[in-house]
Amino acid sequence: MHRKSLLSLLMLSIGVGLLVAAMVVGAASASSQQSASSGSLIVTQAGTGFDTLDPQLSYVSNDWGLLYNTELTLLNFPTKAGTAGTKLIPEAASAFPTISNHGKTYVFHIRSGLRLSNGSAVTAANFVRSFERNLSPKMFAAYGVFDGLDVFLQGGQAFAETGAYSHASNGSCGSGAGSKCTMSPPQHISGLVAKGRTLKIRLTKVVPQFTSIMAMPWFMAIPSKMAYNKTAGGILKYASGGPYYIASNDNQSLTVLKRNPHWPTSSYFKSNWPSNPTSIVVKSYPNSNGTPQLLQAEKNQVDIAGVASQDVVSVKNKYGVNRRHGQFHVGPTTCILWNAMNNASANGTTSQFKIRKALNFAMSRTAENNFNGPLAGDASEQVLVPAIPGYKKITYYGGKGNLSAAQSTGGSALNGAPLVIYYNVASNSQTNIAEYMQSQADKLNMHATLQASDSSGYYHPLMTKSIAEGAGGYNITASGGWCADYEDGYDYFNVNFDGRTIGDTGNTDYMYFNNATFNGDMDHAASLTGSARATAYGNLDKEFMQNYAPIIPKQITNTREFSSKRVSNWVYSTWWGQGFWNAIKLS
């Protein structure tokens, strides 16, 4: 949910950040040009606030886009354009890890002299705490479980209380065969050993993507005693080790980043992770369609704004696209947009495969994508994107909206079937998409109704099992999607569609899809390495859409951002799908 990105992005046009990891939303606005001239970069984001900037609970694109500026991770992506910005290099670690024990033991050595923004020295213990918060049942969501970290780490399941160590909801041990749960789960993960600036990580098996996982914001250095938190919004501000830290934050309207006074001054850090603005001010407008913030950016009252669907043509005609020293920036991402369908049996309509398949035929990717405006991205009918090993283009449903094929596929099950379409009313494009979907469903003799998201946030109701499965729960979303946490099919399939990870809250599998056969196929793909692994995930892509289809994939997105005349040194990240805020220079 790496949820990547901070924005002036496409997220503004669809009105919500993606789960995942690679893009940023459009950006904050400033109250006056005077504040901009003080050295503060002013970013605006429309149609959304931040779900949370608590690093272990954050899993949406705009959250992660901001956290790139505050994180100190063992390995990180440098602030570089092009291919150089997609290759991990050591950051907090002095070098890449030493790997032994047939690929199951990793040793990282932490650089000396690193400090959090509160002045405390960074040691291995700061990273151990990030793992603990990421897997603890004391958190609102144990997101590391979705990435399989509880299974990968020695002692991970005992700590996370998963698998054979799972506790029943009443707090007592389960009675199933092979249960190993105890009433006193361990307070620490046995596979993590911290000694000063040395961190040893012991795995239960070879995990080909493990080094890449270490660059996720979840595993940034945090205070070694940072508290657990059960709220969806998490802890609002805390000491961090990156070039900036969160000085103030309310998640929904104003977030202010200030330079970390202890950020290293060596050429290595300055060249790879500069901190050019003196501060970064992000203003969020959850109920805006983005046009007012764009107008402010054109007047140089704010510095970055997203370009929403309704504004793309006029901005393109006036400013051109990706001109040298230009103001309208468009770039590719690793993100796939989809309509998510609720597969929970209690939900009824979309728990039926033939109806999900019928809706895949009925919904035109072209029509839905057109509502996102020009330059929004390329149509797609699959989960994987070209950047992921194993990708092969799939065109199983035709992409044009075939009502005849939909009717013959769904048959009488479509007649009068209720279809609750969930969308963000603050987004023009999402509203238009939802109304289009309703029209197509009506043509299939379904009973389609629209359900607007509320102030709890777009994803919160989807990711909360009791809401999604309760009376009036959604059947299909107008938007949703995923951006890469790392370049591997595991991140797209196992993280999103393994029903064994479904819990009460914070679900990445907010489709509530759980199929034993497909779970086994994902397990097999994850056990492979190299070309065999890539081929297996490519095959899963085809199997998934032909035999299960719990989503309607529709578009591989671009980012569309506008910058003020004050902005120079625009560096676009092809990994994060955004311009790097920390690299920007202000005139």
Image: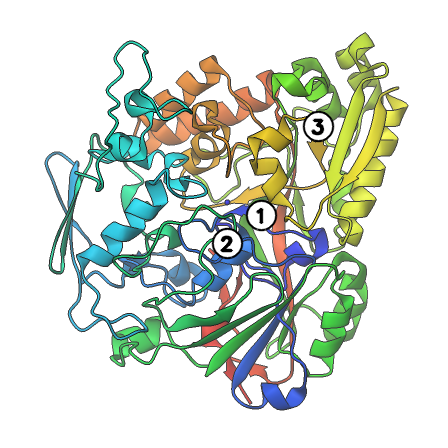
Callout 2 amino acid: Lys
Judging by the rendered image, the residue that carries numbered circle 2 is: 4
Mark 1 near mark 2, Cβ–Cβ under 8 Å? yes
Callout 1 amino acid: Leu
Residue 124 visible, this orientation: yes
Q: Quadrant location of residue 160?
A: top left
| Above or below, comparing residue 349 to residue 477 in the picture | above
Task: Identify which residue is drawn at 24% across, 32% down.
Answer: 185
**The C terminus sits in image quarter:** bottom right
Q: Residues within 10 Å of mark 1 (few under 14, many from 20)?
A: many
Q: Is residue 95 left or right of residue 454?
A: left
Q: Is residue 217 left or right of residue 299?
A: left
Judging by the rendered image, the residue that carries numbered circle 3 is: 475
Chain-order first, disc 1 or disc 2: 2
Q: Camera-side residue: 389 or 142?
A: 142
Q: Secondary structure at mark 1?
A: loop
Q: Camera-side residue: 265 or 334?
A: 265
User: How far apart are the two marked residues, 1 and 2, measured between alpha carbons?
Assistant: 8 Å
Task: Identify which residue is drawn at 31% across, 40% down.
Answer: 209
